[in-house]
Image (tube, grey):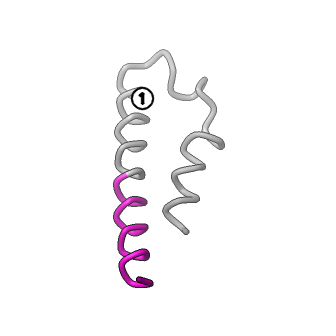
Amino acid sequence: MFWGSRWLCQFAAFTPSIWRGSRLRTAGHLGFAVLWTGITATFATALVAATA
């Protein structure tokens, strides 16, 4: 749940004005969005496998 909430914060808490307009910050935002998606999917898969 922690990583899923971190993923939500990536889009809800950080306003686009922070990272838009800068190629480096935009790349960082997208990179971290992909990272949090992968981590969340990994832990969600592990949770489902453990409860099945």
The kind of secondary structure the magenta stretch mainly shows is helix
Q: Residue at x 65, y 43 (%)?
A: 13
Q: Is residue 51 above or below residue 8?
A: below
Which residue is the site of mark 1? 25
Residue 28 x %, y %: 38, 35
Locate residue 9 relative to residue 37 in the image: left or right: right
Res 42 → quadrant: bottom left
Q: Residue furthest top?
A: 21
Amino acid residing under circle 1: Arg
In the rendered image, residue 40 lying in the magenta stretch gets the answer: yes
Q: Is residue 40 above or below residue 48?
A: above
Q: What residue do we see at 36% from left, 43% from top?
A: 34
Give whichever of 5, 52 is nearer the camera.
52
Residue at left offset 43%, top offset 76% = 47
Q: How many marks?
A: 1
Tell me residue 44's x, y (percent): 43, 67
Please state if 12 lies on the left or on the right of 2 as rendered. Answer: right
SS at badge 1:
helix
Of 21 and 39, nearer the camera is: 39
Would you place residue 9 above or below residue 22 in this image? Answer: below
Please state if 5 lies on the left or on the right of 46 as rendered: right
Q: Position of residue 27 (x, y in %)?
A: 35, 29
Q: Which residues are magenta?
A: 38-52
Residue 50 x %, y %: 39, 84
Q: Is residue 16 highlighted in magenta?
A: no
